[in-house]
Image (cartoon, grey):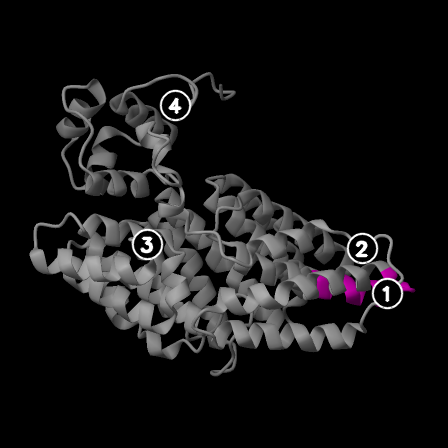
Amino acid sequence: MPVDGTPDPNEIPLSFGQRLKLLRTRRGMTREVLAGLAGKSASWVKAVESGRLGTPKLSMLFRLAEVLRVRDLAELTGDQSMPVELFTGPGHKHLPKVRTAVNAFPVATSRPAPPVAHLRARLDRAWNARHSAPNHRAVLGALLPDLISDAQLSARQADDATARRAAQAVLAEVYALAQFFIAYQPAQDLLWRVAERGMIAAQESEDPHTIGVAAWLMAQAHRDAGDWDAADTVTAETSRLLRPQLADGTAELLAIWGALQFESGYTAARRGELGNAWRHWDTAHDIAERLPADYYHPVTSFSRAIMGAHAVTVAVELRSGGESVRQAERAPAEAIPSRPRRARHRIEQARAYHLDAQPAAALAVLDAAHEAAPETIRYNGYARRIILEELDAASQGCRERAGALAAKVGLLA
């Protein structure tokens, strides 16, 4: 039972209505707020919670799960037969080898570590491959086991403080790359292990940019886990650390500071804090304008080109249907050089159209996302939920298009 004394909906047998009420109150939502976000009336919510109405159809379950930030539909329904991978994405074939590499510290080997400069060159090529590959998890999954092992070895064998700090910086960034591979897979334990080790390695490096990158990823992990206070703490404390160094800093240091400002706005949007969310977006936008026009941060994608995509995300997270569509139509995906990030933006555009009750437009944009980077849409829970919901649409055209997309992304496999 949680420390606040309320029952855990997974510990005792509860009706759907009781689970809905518990999850709603834990999020601090009134019936009116939940009803508005789900497109229903407060009386409908009350009727479901009281048991006068039964469990709604699948499309409404998906909508409620998204509004309540439920990662596993069983948390809402109590039905453990629903595969988690419908919402988190499947486990990639390379995941076991990446897990083994993360867990296997090289403590008893005589093999000499590669030079840090060699590791840095390999890491840079890996980032370039990630941005250019339509199936970036396949590329990263093949590269990561050796990169992780060699970077761990390099950090262990460094023979002086300067070399050790440089090796720890590379190790932290290798863990960052691994976090991109692991995200949206059924491996939350591994994701947290990588995020925490990346933060420790970054602190050992004493490099401000490296610390900023690790903090950016840690904030995302906290936010996606629903711990918004922890996400805010990470971004605020890291921003205070970096701020004094901005005046004489590099473009990459300025970019990571800007990325952290947007992360604060993203979390504020999750909380429903409209003014705070857009204030942070404005700050991040001003920082992006100080960067060279063609600059693109290799880890965070922070750049001038990405700010339109970030505006779509803020509007969608605030559940502003009309505003999210306006932002979506002002932010061309073609401006984003990274294929997986371009596909992710398309998915956010699809969320905007879906939120605004334009399912045909949402499915069309998801088609474009699949064309840009098939693996991105295959592993994205928002995209999967839209597709699954539209399989139950009133329009035959939407049902057929959703069915074709479901087959493409492997939902019907």
Whether label 2 touches label 1, CB < 8 Å: yes
The residue pinned by badge 3 equals 413
**Which portion, as a residue range, is magenta?**
157-171
**Residue 169 painted magenta:** yes
Say which element carries label 4.
loop
Q: Name the mark nearer the viewer: 3 or 4.
A: 3
Task: Give the distance between the C-alpha atoms of the residues marked 4 and 1, in whole angstroms.
Answer: 51 Å
The residue pinned by badge 4 equals 9
Task: Give the distance between the C-alpha atoms of the residues marked 4 and 2, in whole angstroms.
Answer: 42 Å
The three-letter code of the residue at mark 4 reads Pro
Task: Give the distance between the C-alpha atoms of the residues marked 2 and 3, in whole angstroms.
Answer: 39 Å
Q: Residue furthest right?
A: 159
Q: Main secondary structure of the magenta part?
A: helix
The residue pinned by badge 1 equals 111
Q: Is residue 249 visible?
A: no
Name the quadrant of the C terminus. Answer: bottom left
Q: Earlier in the sequence, mark 4 or mark 1?
A: 4
From the viewer's perspective, is residue 342 above or below residue 42?
below
